[in-house]
Amino acid sequence: MDSTAPGAAPRGLDAFRRGWETQIGDDVFQLPAFSPDTIGDFRVKGHVAKVQGAAIADLHAASATRTADVPGGDQDLVAMYVVQRGAWTLGGPPDCGEQTVSAGQFLVRHVGRLSAFETSAHLTAKFFVLPPGELKPLLGNRVITGPADSAEIRLLTALTDMIHITVADLGPAGVEAAHAALIELAKAVTKGRFDDVEPRLAPALTQAAKDLADRRLADPELSPAMLARELNVSVRTLHRAFAAVGEQVATYIRHRRLQEARLALTAPSGRLSISELAAHWQFADSSHFTRTFKKHYGQTPTEYARSTGAASLSPNRHPPGHGPAESA
């Protein structure tokens, strides 16, 4: 769904609504009416998917949005908001007042009646509509908030990213498994902990660990122990999750570092020497890096650089004409 094209408004809202109704339908969540003040410049795009009785959406709003006065029609669902940028302000019962989910925060609550909301411009957020069956008893009348980088939200985010990629190809059994894992992780967010022996969560735990490792590849502290600590699981649980999908944690880290080093070998400018590449990507020394690179790619780093037309690299010296670089 995309209503951000220049000149899209006021058709922008219509395009967004059609996209939502086509992909989600009205049976899970019906979009409210929006304020005329924001309809004229409605620039929102989203990636949404329906997983049985649940809906997941990645939303990017270039413009601010605000709903019209909402009559308060009955609903029965659990809503979760994970805000990466901007802010999402939610209306609530008269005795609760408004609640704002700021960047870096999440909020989850049961919704019994339709309520108003507004979002800031330049919002990036994930929005989940979940069936109340297993979640409503855990929530009651509570509104749960917390940091968006908590272990439970990391896993939920990893799962929803995988669902977005695969949902079109999933058969009935795959959709059922995705839905079950989604509910389990939503329960984990509600309780502040998850069942680390639940086999259905292994793919989400593995992906969350990979996402975290990808952001820390140059960190000398990166290890299975560090990933397990960040994701609030035991090292054994992390290894078991990777094994369930046929992988190993240390092997993934090593291969990703080699991939980044290979890209750096053919960078158009500012290439690092072999020794600097080895140090940057946390190999013991240039000899270890060279052996590992050749075992994986069938060529030494220098041979690979030459084969791609890059200048020769010495073990300890920059190629002629290239000074030190800050990173690969």
Image (tube, rainbow, N blue to C red):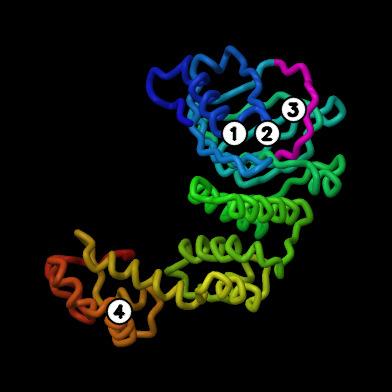
Residues at marks 2 and 1 touching, judged by CB atoms closer than 8 Å: yes
Amino acid type indicated by mark 4? Phe
Question: In the drawing, what numbered circle is on residue 28?
Answer: 2
The x, y position of residue 77, in whole percent, is 76, 36
Q: Which element type, helix, strand or loop, lies under badge 1?
A: loop
Residue at left 50%, top 29%? 44
Q: Based on the displayed image, in which of its 4 quarters is residue 303 positioned?
A: bottom left
Q: Nearer the viewer, mark 1 or mark 4?
A: 1
Closer to the camera, 213 or 135? 135
Q: Which residue is mark 3?
A: 91
Magenta region, residue range: 69-79
Whole-angstrom CA distance, mark 2 to mark 3, is: 20 Å
Q: Nearer the viewer, mark 4 or mark 3?
A: 4
Whole-angstrom CA distance, mark 4 to mark 3, is: 56 Å
Q: Nearer the viewer, mark 3 or mark 1?
A: 1
Image: 109 above or below 247: above
Q: Which residue is mark 4?
A: 293
Q: Is residue 40 left or right of residue 118?
A: left
Residues at marks 4 and 2 touching, judged by CB atoms closer than 8 Å: no
Q: Based on the displayed image, in which of its 4 quarters is residue 265 positioned?
A: bottom left
Q: Image quadrant for the C terminus? A: bottom left
Residue 203 in the magenta stretch? The answer is no
Mark found first going from the N terminus, 1 or 4 = 1
